[in-house]
Image: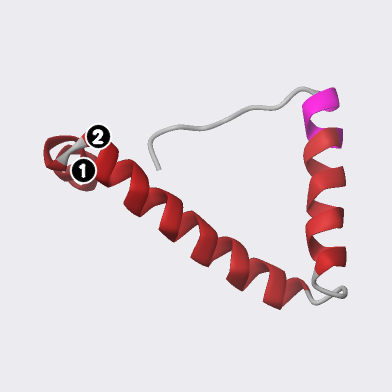
């Protein structure tokens, strides 16, 4: 990973609340929630790759 995101306490609390809601939506099954998040991120990455074109994708893979 090239980019590290740092959160302030307010952002961290908001992220934690969203994570709890996401896991709750999966009836408390953290592994199921994680798998869905991975799938969703993959779909979003595909859309981003299409939108930005092949040149930005290849440079990201090299880094």
Q: Is residue 5 magenta?
A: no
How packed mark 2 is, by other alpha carbons closer than 10 Å (few <14, some 14-19, many 20 or more), is few
The answer to whether residue 26 is left or right of residue 39 is: right
Residue sitting nearer the eye, 3 or 30: 30
Q: Residue at x 19, y 35 (%)?
A: 56
Residue on which disc 1 sits: 57
- Of pointers 2 and 1, the one earlier in the residue sequence: 2
Q: What's the mark number on residue 52?
A: 2
Give the magenta part as a residue range: 9-13
Q: Is residue 12 magenta?
A: yes
Q: Residue at x 79, y 34 (%)?
A: 12
- SS under mark 2: helix
Residue sitting nearer the eye, 17 or 50: 50
- SS under mark 1: helix
The main secondary structure of the magenta stretch is helix
| Image quadrant assignment for residue 52 | top left
Residue sitting nearer the eye, 5 or 20: 20
| Image quadrant assignment for residue 58 | top left
- C-alpha span from label 2 to label 1: 8 Å
């Amino acid at each position: 990973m090239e980019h590290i995101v740092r959160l302030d306490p307010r952002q961290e609390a908001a992220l934690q609340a969203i994570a709890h809601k996401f896991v709750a939506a999966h009836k408390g099954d953290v592994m199921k929630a994680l798998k869905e998040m991975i799938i969703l991120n993959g779909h979003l990455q595909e859309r981003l790759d299409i939108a930005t074109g092949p040149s930005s994708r290849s440079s990201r893979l090299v880094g």
